[in-house]
Amino acid sequence: MNLVWKLLRQHISIPQFAGFFLANLIGMLIILLGVQFYTDTQSIYNSEDSFLKDDYLIVNKRVSLTGATSSFSQEDMDDLAAQPFIERVGAFIPSKFKVKAAFAIDGVPAFSTDMFFESVPDEFVDVKSKKWHFDEQSTTIPIILPRSYLDLYNFGFAQTQNLATLNEGAFSLAKLQVQLEGNGIKLQLEGRIEGFSGRINTILVPESFIQWANEHFSDPSTPEKGATRLIMQVNNPTDENLARYLTHHHYITDQDKLDSSKTNFILRVIVGIVMGVGIIISILAFYILMLSVYLLVEKNNTKLENLLLIGYSPTRVARPYQMLTVGLNIMVLILALVILFFLRGIYLDMFKGMFPRMEIPSMMPAVLVGLGLLLLVSILNIVAVRTKIMSIWKRKN
Amino acid sequence: MNVIELQQTLPQVFASRTDIESDVWLKDVRLERGKTYLVEANSGTGKSSLCSYIFGYRKDYQGTILFDGEDISRFNVNRWVDIRKHHFALLWQELRLFPELTSMENVLIKNKMTSHQTTAQIDEWFERLGIADKKDAKIGRMSFGQQQRVAMIRTLCQPFDFVFVDEPISHLDDTNSAIMADILTTEAHKQGAGIIVTSIGKHMQIHYDQVLKL
């Protein structure tokens, strides 16, 4: 056995070091669990099937009883677009003419209804189709319906009326007779269902069609109004800044997504508090360790001094205690990571039950934070031991 | 290191005294490598203080101490570690052995650091000094005379330009004193080193080039 270690391990108090070990383990575990839990929950927020994720939000102004305008001005839109958490903004343009649609089966009109069209800029449309365009020569209008209509038919209407359920493809084969009327002109066109949108809850047509049709069929005497609904692409719908901005401007969104920002904010606060407790425990554990080492150095003061006097350098004399503290820190980190691995397994099983398609993040954040803490604490330990040994050297020097 | 010089050196505790009659304090003293010196002292005249000053252990003195013309008060930690390891061996009056270790371990803890002496040489010294059977005995269980011999062996387990032995034979009989003197001088001559022996009464029977009264 190394003789220097044999000497310097005298007076090592096992209960003191066990106390440090346990306290540091608990502190470290709480910190790492906080980091890892937060990372894992963020993964749920960002997973594809997440109820919390939607990169697109549709907003409108609160409709007031006084009849004040509920449309967005150009300044409103510019201000929205300038916000860092909003990537782009597009306006809904409504049709300003009468639309009648008739659904024909085998050329015989099955039913006919008044309806309306709206458009959004093409880049916000989630149904990707090459036929999504319109020009004056076209005789067919591509239409996108809300997916909820399809669900309504398949799971509501068809079930109760003993009709066959239809998939998206079948609907695209159906022909709609669309009649546009306004400004004293009537025009018969064909409508084709291009797809169903989960994002936009309206009867959608290409923006180029709305612009063309509004120009031809709307009453020129009707004053121009701003858009009443906007679609926005946002970086992160859980961003609390977004929620704060919308609330401040009295904008409302038809989706519950913004609630998740509040959930996320509260989650962050809770994780922050838990990690704060972990950090306090770790600081206290560090304090216990330093006290133990100082006590040890005091008790072995004569031995340390004699080693220095027979030619050992302060660096060499400090090394056993430095290795002891760093070794303990490493053991604490490894054990904390092992325990974290099992604890995480328990809650991840629950998460996976709820969000089957969530991607399981790696434990890298916890490992990196743990290594960072290990490095920081070890450097402090090394410096403290060295300083203490130097004080022995200098006391009489 | 070839020369140790003391220039007007005096322990600070003696600063107010006016009756100092010494060959060392408040004098210019020159100790040369290869020569042997005896510093004779009465109790309380600062003999151990002198050891501590030259060894960089204490600085509570006035005047100047020079190693090869360099003021030792300016030496840094690394310089002192190098001096204690390679240039200056000191046998402390209070020995400074480790009671938790055996006598052999007390010697090895230094020799492993310096790798200076062979195991055979160390064994031979244990043998000659009559403590071969005590190699594995804990220092705490040995008599002071036996401990002095172990401390002497440990002192010699390093290269040195000077060896300073502070009352090395205070608890030894004449036979063991003579053996120790022989071991010390042989080892010092081998390295061409200077020897400084202090004594308050009984002193090693060796040839001294100079005797200094403290």
Image (cartoon, coloured by chain):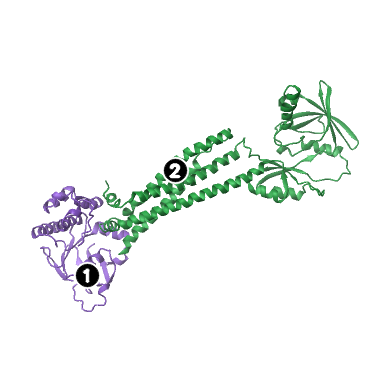
Chain colours: A green, B purple
**Chain holding disc 1:** B
Q: With respect to residue B107, does A115 lie above or below?
A: above
Is residue A104 shown above or below B148?
above
Give the amino acid at mark 1.
Answer: Gly
The lab-note entry on whether marks 2 and 1 share a chain reads no
Q: State the SS at label 2.
A: helix
Chain ID for label 2? Answer: A
Q: Position of residue A128 (x, y in %)?
A: 70, 32
Residue sitting at the far left: B175
Query: Along the line of sight, which residue is nearer the eye, A178 or A13?
Result: A13
Q: Is residue B190 left or right of residue A232?
A: left
CA distance separating discs 2 and 1: 57 Å
For image coordinates 35% across by 49% down, the residue present is A15
In the current view of this chain or complex, which residue is farthest to the right? A184
Label 1 near label 2: C-beta < 8 Å? no
Q: Nearer the viewer, mark 2 or mark 1?
A: 2
Amino acid type at mark 2: Ala
Mark 1 Cα shell of 10 Å, populated few (<14), some (14-19), many (≥20): some
Taking depth in this image into account, of A181 and B33 the one nearest to the observer is A181
For this orientation, the residue located farthest to the bottom is: B18
Give coordinates of residue B139: x percent, y percent: 19, 53
Q: Which residue is mark 2?
A: A336
Give the label on residue A356, or none: none
- For mark 1, what is the residue? B46
The crowd level at tag 2 (other Cα within 10 Å; few <14, some 14-19, many 20+) is many
The image quarter containing residue B7 is: bottom left
The reply to whether residue A378 is in sight is yes
| Secondary element at image label 1 | loop
* Image spot of residue A195 (x, y percent): 72, 30
Rendered-image quadrant of the C terminus of chain A: bottom left
Residue A359 in view, yes or no: no
Residue A94, position as x, y percentages in the image: 80, 39
